[in-house]
Amino acid sequence: MRIRYLRRPPARTAGRVYLLDLDNTLHEASTHILPEINRQMTDYLARKLNVSREAASAARTQYWQRYGATLLGMMRHHGINPHEFLAETHRFDDLKAVSRRHASVPHRLSRLNGLRVLLTNAPRAYATEVSKILGLHRHYHALVSIEDMVIHGAWRPKPTPILWPHLKAALKSKRLLLVDDTLGHLHEASRHGIQTSWITLPGLGFVAHKPKGRVRSRIRQFEQIKRLKF
C-alpha cells in the first residue's frame, strides 16, 4: 500500500483526512469520459477473450459488479497484465476536450482543512492528467491510484475489504472521511470506521433516495463537504 505525497500538508489539519474519489466526485465524467472508457474496456475484452462485443460488455459489467473493478476479474480469470489493461483502456486523443469541471470545485477543494488525498481506482497517468487539466492537482496533498493499492503482492482497489485498514495505517489517522459516488465503496469503508458521504452530482441520473445502512450522509454539491463533521 503506497501513499504518494505530492506536497507537504498544512501544519494544522486537526488530524482530518479527506479521501476523495475522482470520476463523478471531483468532476463530471458520465457524459464523455466514462462511456469512452467502457467502450475501450469492451473492445479490449473482446480482443483478449476472442468474443463478440456483446459478450465482452456483459463480462465487463459482471466483473465490475462482482469485484468492484473489471481489472480484477480479468486478472483473476484470464491472467492479463494489469498495466497493459490500464494503458489500453484509458486512452484519449484529447482529454482536455472531454473534461468537464464542476463550478468552483478547485477553490472549494483548497479550503478543506485537512489532509486531502485523491483515492481513485483510475490509473495514475489518467488521474494526474485529468486533475491537471481541471486545476485540481495542485490542491491534493497525496495521490493513491489503483497501482498503489497493492497489498501483499495483490491488487486490492476499492471496495476490497483489506484495503481500508492498510490505508488507515499508512495515513496514521483515525479521522477519515471518504467522499465517493459509488455506494459499494462507501459501505465497505464505513465497516472499517471511516466516515462516509455519498456524492450525487446533479444531472447524473442518481435515484433520489437516502443512503442506507452505515452510509448516512448524501451531498449534491462539492461545497457541502466542508460542513460534514468527522
Image (tube, rainbow, N blue to C red):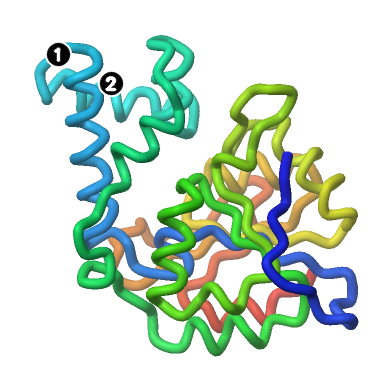
Q: Residues within 10 Å of mark 1 (few under 14, many from 20)?
A: few
Disc 2 marks a residue whose amino acid type is Ala
Residue on which the image places disc 2: 59
Closest to the observer: 5 or 222? 5
- Report which quarter residue 154 is drawn in: top right
Q: Quadrant of residue 39?
A: top left
Q: What residue type is disc 1 on?
A: Val
Residue 197 visible in rendering? no
Residue at coordinates 59% horizontally, 62% vertically from top-left? 20
Q: Residue 76: horizontal and vertical position, in percent?
A: 48, 14
Residue in front for this viewpoint, 34 or 190 = 34
What residue sits 50% from the left and 64% below the top?
199
Q: Is residue 50 left or right of residue 125?
A: left
166 sits left or right of 161 in the view: right
Q: Which mark is residue 51?
A: 1
Relative to 13, does residue 142 appear above or below in the rendering? above
Q: Position of residue 196 (x, y in %)?
A: 66, 57
Query: What x and y, as percent, mark residue 42?
Result: 21, 31
- Marked residue nearer the N-terminal end (2 or 1): 1
| Disc 2 to disc 1: CB gap under 8 Å | yes
